[in-house]
Amino acid sequence: MNITKEIEKLEKSAVKLTVTIAKKDVAENYNETLKKYVKQVQIPGFRKGHVPANVLERKYGDMIKQEAAADLIDQSMNEIFADEAEKENRPLPYAQPALEKMPELNVSKDFTYTVTYDVFPQVSVKDFNGITIKEPQVSVGDKELEEELKGIQERNAVVIDKKDGEKVAKDDIVTINYSENGEDGKEIEGSKREGFVFTVGTGENIYEIDDDIIGMKKDETKQITKTYAADNKNADLAGKTKNINVTVTQIKVRDLPALDDDLAQDVNEKFKTLDDLKADIKKNLEAAKERKVNDIKTNDLLSQLVEKNPFDIPASMLQAELDGRWQMMAQQFQTTPADLERMVTASGQKKEDMLANWTGDAEKMLKSRIIVDSLLRERNISVTPEEIDAEYQKIADSNGISVEEVKKHYADARSKEYLIDETKEQKLYKELFAQVKVTKGDKVSFADLFKQN
């Protein structure tokens, strides 16, 4: 097909493609379409396949021309985008080219049409000047080790009843019956609850009565009058005084196992002593710290690169990302996107407002992703089979499993491709960190490190 094309760059990575097809190809395509109609159409008075072309043109001329025009557009666009030289000008997969106007087909003239569509943004990341990355200074010490050991104790604890006469204390697991009384001293209908269980000190109860039941005994009933601050996060409590009738029906306590070799062996048979368990915990904490610090450094680097190398995100790409986030949220709520919108509307919110709030973060994420992809291509980052084997070993060591188990996990093509892509990115970040200035940041506790976004 004899085609000429003109591509005009528009804002936000959109392009306008104008295509002209030579009249010879137009005539040939029209005749082929006409022949197809001759074979298929049946008109009274003519045998199928023997309807004269001029009769068909008089009866179905406009329809035949429209089909021929649509076919010319499809064929020519497929031919253009199959050309590797036009790779950068291919439309995004979720943005169909929009035809400005369907042109009339005249078999004696060239056929010209224009479409607009979004393309993948072309970014050349050159500006690394002035980028400084502050690396948080975090140490893993006895405090962090003790907290992990305490968690292991609690997970392996046995819950037992407290002895009769013993009082409620912080961290006890209590079962209570409660109700709220009105100003007249009568029980408020619908406020009664029996068999409510919570751990004292967690605040996981509607009236925040943890401190008020400390010291109570089993089967003891207490009338609690409690006034709540005006800025209480619970609007039903803020600035109000509540009269709550509480009866403790059960008091249980966690019987924590001793921190010894037996506990270590119960956790995992690979541990022979408590010191073995401690060493493994310390190794895992250090690995978690390194991953988090690296994530923070990477996010900081990408944020600065986005700021120093500005470009626009195609509208269709941003919309696809927002739609994807909405669908993911629907899955989290185990519902459909349409039902999620109805739920949001019923709560007094609007889907449009929520998407607008997500837009800034979505744009930043997309720009970061595009910059990474561009740098991977520019620098021709690749990984060898040996490097992937090293990753298998690293994963095996950090999870305490064999390399064979790791390879089995990444056996399918999709999982292995994900690991390859991740390894490429880590190689890229290592190169980039060598190009920018990395300085020591503030000292941060292990717990606070993981509170950072």
Image (spheres, rainbow, N blue to C red):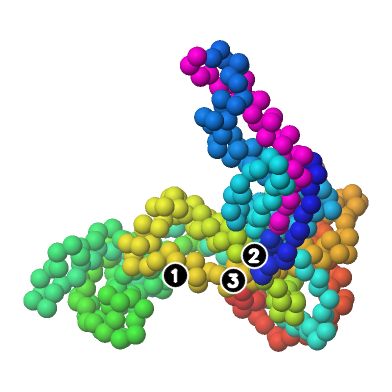
> What residue lies at 30% left-to-right and 86% top-to-bottom?
230
Residue bearing mark 2: 314
Nearest the eye: 198 or 136: 136
**Residue 238 horizontal/vertical position (percent):** 29, 81
Q: Earlier in the sequence, mark 1 or mark 3?
A: 1
Instruction: Tell me if 260 is positioned left or right of 219 in this view.
Output: right
**Residue 353 horizontal/vertical position (percent):** 44, 70
Name the residue type under label 1. Answer: Asp
Nearest the eye: 98 or 224: 98
Q: Earlier in the sequence, mark 2 or mark 1?
A: 2
Name the residue type under label 3. Answer: Asp
Residue bearing mark 1: 353
* Distance (Cα) linking label 1 and label 3: 14 Å
Q: Earlier in the sequence, mark 2 or mark 3?
A: 2
Q: Are marks 2 and 3 in contact (CB under 8 Å)?
A: no
Task: Answer few, some or many: residues within 10 Å of disc 2's Cα (few below 14, many 20 plus, some between 14 and 19).
Answer: many
- Helix, strand or loop at label 3? It is helix
Task: Answer few, some or many: residues within 10 Å of disc 3's Cα (few below 14, many 20 plus, some between 14 and 19).
Answer: few
Residue bearing mark 3: 361
**Residue 15 horizontal/vertical position (percent):** 69, 62
Magenta stretch: includes residue 84: no
What range is drawn magenta here?
17-45
Dominant secondary structure (helix, strand or loop) of the stretch shown in magenta: helix
Nearest the eye: 361 or 67: 67
Q: Of tags 2 and 1, which is closer to the observer?
A: 2
**Would residue 289 be seen by someone viewing this image from the given angle?**
no
- Helix, strand or loop at label 2? It is loop
